[in-house]
Amino acid sequence: MSFYKFGPNDLFFNVIKTYPKCSFFIYSGSLSYNNQISGSGQFGASINHVPSGHISLHEVNVDRPSGQLIYPFISKNSTHVAPRTVSAKDYNGTFSYGDELVATYPLSASIVKTLVAGGSSRNTIVALRNSLDFYTPLSRHYAYTSSYGDKSTQTIGLVSIPSIFYGSSIKKGTVGLKYYLTGTLIAELKDEKRNGELVQTGPYGSTGTGSVAGVVLYNEGFLLLTGSWALDSAAQELYNDSVLDNPKWIHFAQSISGSSTVASSSFNLEFNGTNPVPVRTLLAHAPIGELNHSSNPTYIEHGQALTPISGTYHYTENDELRIKNVVSSAYADPTGSFRKTTFISKIGIYDEKKNLIGIAKLATPVKKTEDRDFTFKLKLDF
């Protein structure tokens, strides 16, 4: 078997950016992610043991009985290093050596809606102030306090999107929000300008068309909705349990907050994430005049004595075995002139200690003769 070392011009590193699309549909307190139906399993109502519209982080408890779920744990040992969720005092005084500290699976994630009323405690909004200031050069609507509104006092609908859904950032120009009332689209927001402004784009002639109803924090995964105009002045629902109000952008996705089911309103949120994929490209060369002998048993012409001769003082193999001639000819007999020919079907990748760490398989074996050379392009995503 021949080994070849990758040269300095045979290895390339680059990053491919993908933009996976995410879609959430909210109705009457239920949530659907990418139009997926949460399938029931043999041992539970949900095959992944997570609610509809959620992602299971590890997906290690697929269709398992609730009493036999896989769980994470650590054992106390002599290192005296406590996990960050347990104080050093409790770790050293409460637990004995060998005790297991366990947690629970599955871990899940989904979007969250929080309505921050005007004048109420708004630690979450204050925590985003630096991020809002960072985006201010894109649009003045990001400003914490400006002529466009004071985020320290105004009512804000905060939609939080975990990064597992969008990757490194939300792609600009792909955010879309749709507000339905009894199945009819009454308003739509888009970040058409790619500057974070959520502008109401339709339906044509609807109340608030052309107005900015909020902003997007692309890297952090937050939507701050400040649009407080009535999208339909004739309709009212219990968006806050006991208070009737008109449909407004600050009430978008309010039914998943747990404060109300909002039977007549439904919502749709769409965006594209950004997922950078590191790619390693390797060039494997098959030079002229090399790789033209095979250890495959079919390489030898059939009907020859392959059994070696052995005795007390010797072990001898037949050194005059004929190689099968596979050169094509217009006639069945005789065949074409003999040429050493092999077929490359696999390429092995080895580390510096010649341990096999990867195999690249060809869909169709490649014919290799002594006067041919090939370069195989291998790609590895990680």
Image: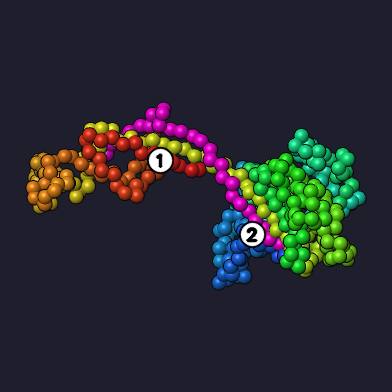
x, y (%) of residue 171?
65, 44
Residue 8 falls inside the magenta stretch: yes
For marks 1 and 2, give the CA distance: 35 Å
Q: Earlier in the sequence, mark 1 or mark 2?
A: 2
Q: Amino acid at mark 2?
A: Tyr
- Using the image as rendered, state which of residue 204 and residue 155 is in the foreground: 204
The number of discs equals: 2
- Using the image as rendered, state which of residue 246 and residue 29 is in the foreground: 246
Q: Which residue is mark 1?
A: 378
Q: Residues within 10 Å of mark 2 (few under 14, many from 20)?
A: some
Q: Which mark is residue 33?
A: 2
Identified at 56% across, 58% down, the residue is 60
Relative horizontal placement of residue 208, taking residue 195 as reference (left or right): right
Q: Residue furthest front?
A: 205
Decide if residue 115 is in sight here: no
Relative horizontal placement of residue 325, taking residue 6 as reference (left or right): left
Residue 78 falls inside the magenta stretch: no
The image quadrant of residue 141 is top right
x, y (%) of residue 278?
52, 39
Magenta region: 1-26
Relative horizontal placement of residue 343, taking residue 238 as reference (left or right): left
Q: Residue furthest bottom?
A: 42
